[in-house]
Image (cartoon, helix red, strand yellow):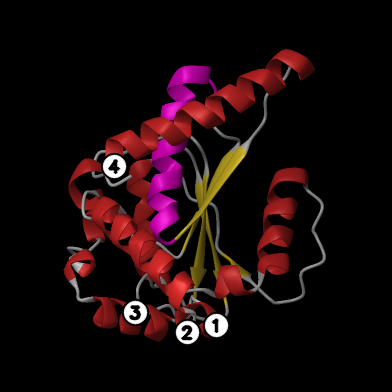
Amino acid sequence: MTDYHALVKTLAAHLTADLLTTREHSGTLTYATFGHSFGATLSLAVAAAVTQETGQPPARAYLSAALPPRLQPPDNLADLPDEDLLAKTAADGGTPPQVLAHPAMRTLLLRMLRQDHTVRRAFPTEAATLQTTAPLTLIAARDDPYAPPEAMRQWAAHTTGPIRQVTIPGGHFAAIHHPRDTLALIAADTTGHPGDGTRRAETGEPHVP
């Protein structure tokens, strides 16, 4: 799927159905959303659509390693030749070398990458007016060359709720390469009980835009 609005609508429909079923059975509804890099903007757009359908925003939305839409540069990577796109993906460090070396997996990966980058082209315009009332937690990696902590703070313009920023060590894929620490951060946020992550995070002060 390469259409931004169709993708948001499809994902929101699936999530809404699951959440309404949960509310019907339990009588209550509490949920949070998480998105990393490409998925951060998409997760917030889906959360906004789900809020319209359910009448309830997420308790908190977690955005990791992502620039807000108006700061995102034009994405023309879908037009690159196969080898150039694979080289760029390898250099980013988020894909295991075994996947890049396997012919069948490489073919599948190329198709997915082209679809992702085609959708991402729409972010700076189609997601520019994205708004939520949900509190945001911004997970920023200290050495991320694509989404530095100071730029991530500008997500504040996309919510009427409070935000806080957590700075973690590492580069662009730090939150994904250390999932236990990321889940521990989320657990501490949503339940008040820290998980068993061990890497140190620097937590910024809450901010109301």
Indicate left or right for 62 with 45 as reference.
right
- Residue linked to disc 1: 98
- Residue linked to disc 3: 86
Residue 145, x across and y down, in percent: 36, 79
State yes or no: discs 2 and 4 in contact (Cβ < 8 Å): no
Residue shown at 49%/49% (left/top)? 163
Q: Compare marks 4 and 3 and give the one earlier in the sequence.
A: 4
Q: Residue furthest front?
A: 104
Instruction: Report the amino acid beneath label 2.
Output: Ala
SS class, disc 4: helix
Q: Specify start and end residues of the magenta stretch as a single range.
A: 37-57
Residue shown at 27%/43% (left/top)? 127
Q: Compare marks 1 and 3 and give the one earlier in the sequence.
A: 3
- Mark 2 or 3: the one toward you: 2
Q: Is residue 200 visible?
A: yes
Instruction: Report the amino acid beneath label 4.
Output: Tyr
SS class, disc 2: helix
- 10 Å crowding of disc 2: few (<14), some (14-19), many (20+): few
Cα separation between marks 2 and 3: 10 Å
SS class, disc 1: helix
Cα separation between marks 2 and 1: 5 Å
- Mark 2 or 4: the one toward you: 2
- Residue linked to disc 4: 4
State yes or no: discs 2 and 1 in contact (Cβ < 8 Å): yes
State yes or no: discs 1 and 4 in contact (Cβ < 8 Å): no
Instruction: Report the amino acid beneath label 1.
Output: Gln
Residue 23, x across and y down, in percent: 69, 18
Label of residue 34 in the image: none
- Mark 1 or 4: the one toward you: 1
